[in-house]
Every structure is written in structure tokens, then in C-alpha cells.
Image (cartoon, rainbow, N blue to C red):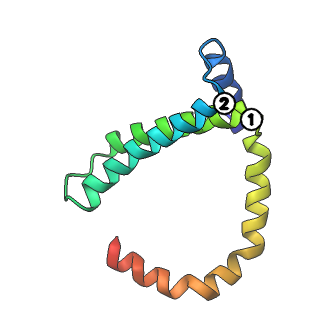
Amino acid sequence: MKLQEIQEFCNRLLSKVAYPRVGTIIGLQEEIGKLAEIVMNIEIYGRPFEKDVLEKRCSEVFFSFLDLCNSYDVHLEKISKDRMDDVINKINNWEKEHGKILEHKRKKFD
């Protein structure tokens, strides 16, 4: 399924129970908080990594993000392509500026 199809499906699914627009950002923030708690428990408190739990939270963030985008008529497929084009134009400079330090940080933190 393409991103646009997923977005349209989400829109149809939630059409009869849609939040007001402000509710979509609050809902997304709530889901991101739950995801952050999972990562915090793994990375800071040493709890076991349970991929299925992380995936569930990621899917909830993704669905909430789709709902937010739909409420403001943001078309993710288009903006994703635009962002990829932007990253392609910037990636070499990012690598020069940040590549070495990020490599070091990944070794330290991952």
C-alpha cells in the first residue's frame, strides 16, 4: 500500500469519530510521550528491548501523525518526495560537518 493510500484509509476510518484539529496534535503528542517512555525504559533504566512493544508504539505515533496531516490536508507522499530531494542536496555537507562526531556518538550510545 502506498503512503497516499494509507493516509486516505486512515481518513476514511476516522471520518465519523474525527477529533477537532487541535485534538490531533494533542493526540500525537500523547503517543510520542508513550513512545519516549518505552525508549527511556530501554536506554536509561535497562529494561529489556521488546521489539513488538516498540513497534506497537511506533504504529500508534504513525497513525496519529496521519490523522494530524489529514486534518490539515497535508499530503505526505508529496512532502516526503520534496523532503528527500532537499536531503539529497544537503547530505554531503551534513556528512562533512557532522559525520565523524555522529559516528563517535553512535559507537558510544548505541
Q: Where, by quadrant of the figure, is residue 25 drawn?
A: top right
Query: Image point 36% across, 44% down: which residue?
Result: 54
Residue indicated by mark 1: 72
Query: Image point 73% across, 43% down: which residue?
Result: 76
Near-viewer residue (32 or 22) = 22
* Sooner in the amino-acid sequence: mark 1 or mark 2: 2
From the top left corner, tell me how far across and down residue 68 is, in percent: 64, 35
Q: Secondary structure at mark 2?
A: helix
* Contact between labelled residues 2 and 1, with CB atoms less than 8 Å apart: yes
Q: Where, by quadrant of the figure, is residue 57 drawn?
A: top left
Residue indicated by mark 2: 21
Amino acid type, label 1: Tyr
Near-viewer residue (31 or 2) = 31
Amino acid type, label 2: Arg
Q: Looking at the picture, does residue 57 appear above or below residue 46?
A: above
89 sits to left or right of 67: right
Q: Residues within 10 Å of mark 2 (few under 14, many from 20)?
A: some
Q: Nearer the viewer, mark 1 or mark 2?
A: 2
